[in-house]
Image: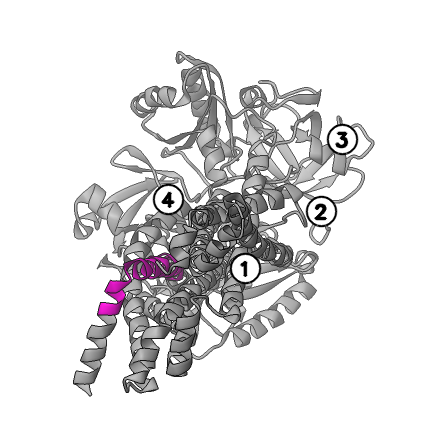
Amino acid sequence: MIALWLQDLRHSLRQLFRSPSFTATVILTLAVGIGLNAAIFTIVDCVLLRPLGYRGADRIYSIDTRFLKDGRVAAKIGGDDYVDVASNVRSIEAIAWFDASTSGLNSGQDGLLLDGQSLYLNMAAVSPQFGSVMGVEPIAGRLFDNTADGAEALVASSFADQHFGSAQAALGHALRYGGRTRTIVGVLPAGFSFPEKAVVWLEFPPRPEIPSRTAYNQRAVARVRSGVSASQLNAEMATLSRQLQTAYPEDRQKSLLAVPLQDQIVGSIRPLLRLLMGSVVVVLLIVCANIGHLQLVRSTRMLREASIRAALGATPTAVARRALLESLLLACAGCACALLIAEPALRVLTLMAGDQIPRLADIHLNRDVFLFSFFMSFAAMLITALLPAWRSFTANPAAALKQEQTSSSESRKSRQLRDALISCEIALTLTLSVASVLLARQMIAQSRQNLGFEPDHLLVMDSHRVNDQQQAAFADSPAALVSLENLLDTIAKEPGVKSVAANQGVPMGTGTSDVGFAVRGRTEFKPGVELPWADIQPITPAYFQTMGIPLLAGRTLVNDDNANSAPVLLVSRELAQKVFPGQNPIGQQIMCGYDMESKWWTIVGVVGDIRQDSPASPLGQTMYVPLAQHSARAGDVQIVVRTGIDPAALAATLEPMLKRSYPQVAVNTTTMLEDVGEASRAQRFRTLLFGAFAAVAILLAGVGMYGVTAYTVAQRRFEFALRFALGANRSQIVTMTLIRGLIVASLGIGVGTALSLALLRIVGKFLGKLPAFDPASYAIAILGVLAIAVAAAIVPSRRAAQVEPMGVLRGN
């Protein structure tokens, strides 16, 4: 038996080497399709399917707040709500709160002092049980012991290696933050960076500093007791929510729920990854169709050989076995080449994605991907080899040899099947092409939208001031304000600086706060009252001039708008139109929960709208308040600089100067154009991916159509020669061949158009609102597919026109 299999193996290898074009085309087609599939599956496997790398990760939950009116879920919790969960939910074994946002105290990108030097890095404020909840074991030292009154810190191994040489050497060193010395008591292992890629974790009290149930200044994670399911935990959370809704007016419009931490981390990327898997499946179907018609072509050519072998005594089983063995060899070769493509494709995908993909450090090719790739290769070859194997198995030697002698043309059914496969390829290709063109046109249109400010020649410096006088979040901080004003004056004197201002919540960045607000004479600012919401940004007077935001009504801020004057603010046009329709907003008064002390602020001006989060974001409601009246915010601001020179060149001058003159200020510098590009990364990532898949699909479809047309021409040489002999000219033959190819392509385009209309509705649910029907996008995609179809058919058509009638009719 072994000898028989070895003989079949040698024969199969010889057959494949005798058909190098067929072998190379199948292997390369498999490699491209399976390689892309393996790269995407690697991301899905590592991000969605594999558990988090924490001890008992399946028992860690995020405690979220659901707002009942609109169904919105926020991964944050009010201060006293957190305390109630910690005290009353018995399913929870341990719970901790943390803050890694980019605004206010405990921000995710604050500065801290190490040996007198301010550092700009990712940090998190956490309660003492954070390490226990996360199940992380330090590689040196210990976790917080809850006995040091919040005077301890944990650092990442990368931070320890960079600043102290080793993890053990970092223990006992002091960090200064918030006017306090914090001792490093533990070093966490490489790979742990939760939340928000933190490298320093500072211990804070067990209870959140701000007790308000409507101030969502922290997030919470909990470790449940062994054996407790998600449904059991959420049933207990629902009971507590009902009790809180009855007891506290501010809790009536919300409930608390627990979400597995892995779902919380990867939830935003899950729809996109599922959509990408669907796109890869489409490419894989095109691969199968391509290989399928190549197999049909080859089986037609090999039918005479199989018939001769059968006539000489070979059993149908032996003939079919050799056909399947050839498919297995091609599958193995295709899988090996696919893995060679998967590795660089995976690197390109992760490079393109940047921070759009969570758990990026966990993504790597693994055993599951290897097995998956081989299974997909073998399945593709097995499916496409079934018909050729069956034809070999059922071959009638006498009939096949008689047909070979009488005609070299293939059967009508075989032609119809191959044409159907090509039409399916084109239909699937058009579907991907329409999606990619639509996304590309949408991205181009959004990039041309008015941002509401002028991003050119704008430098952004994210700063944080650290000193020993820094106090709690909402305490008065005149020293920080004076220091900031001196810093702005120093920058303004630098050559090339036109204007400079400070703000907390610069567009295209993070750190913007949103607040509920009441309008005097309409609503009261008290718990339980439903209020409108708006972004709020403290700014210095020159902010609008520096950003290029127009003043539409009233006045802008001036230096006299300070702590000794009446509270004022400016509002965006969107807020003015929605809150004060048909009225003059100037002089109206607003109260919100931005500060601990509630005051009525008077609107003194209306400014233009901006797109805050990205060029694709809608115009939002924004309030601007004087930073001088909210000096506690002065220690953590973004500085914007309008330049007359290249912003990057100015940054190279400013950074070392600030480091020398203001060592207590940590600064991270970018240009606004870079921030705008970074804000568009998610849309650019998905557009490029769909474009890449569409390009691969078009390439495969083009190869398939070329192969079918070339084979058809070869099979019809006798027919063409006879037509020439009867008076047909060469242009007629070219036209006839092209028309047949275009008919097949047109059928595919018709099916693809209908299919894309249906599928784009599904795509829109994953990628955001898309036009129901965009004629321009369909026209571009259809013309592109038609161009490829014509290009694939024109070379074989020219060969058809070059047939020599007499030679073919003589049998040469």
In the rendering, at what x and y percent does residue 426 appear? Answer: 53, 55
User: Disc 4 to disc 1, how far (Cα)?
Assistant: 53 Å
Distance between the alpha carbons at the discs numbered 2 and 4: 33 Å
Q: Earlier in the sequence, mark 3 or mark 2?
A: 2
Helix, strand or loop status at disc 4: loop
Image-quadrant location for residue 674: top left
- Direction from residue 88 to residue 47 in the image, left or right: left
Residue 143 seen: no
Colouring mode (rainbow / by chain / secondary structure / one colour): one colour
Which SS class for mark 2?
A: loop
Numbered circle sitting on residue 588? 3
Q: What residue type is disc 3 on?
A: Gln
Q: Which image quarter is the N terminus in?
A: bottom left
Question: Residue 388 location in percent, x, y?
Answer: 40, 74
Q: What residue span does the magenta drawing correspond to?
A: 14-42
Any part of residue 235 in sight? yes
Closer to the chain start, of discs 4 and 3, is 4
Residues 329 and 89: in front is 329
Which image quarter holds the C terminus?
A: bottom left
Q: Which mark is residue 122?
A: 4
Report if the CB atoms under discs 3 and 2 are less than 8 Å apart. no
Between circles 2 and 4, the one closer to the viewer is 4
SS category of the residue bearing label 1: helix
Height in image: 141 above or below 671?
Answer: below
Q: Which residue is mark 2?
A: 531
Single out the mark in the foreground, 1 or 2.
Answer: 1
Circle 4 or circle 1, nearest the eye: 1
Task: Give the labeled residue for mark 1.
Answer: 423
Whichever of labels 4 and 1 marks the residue nearer the N terminus, that label is 4
Residue at 28 percent of width and 85 percent of height: 314
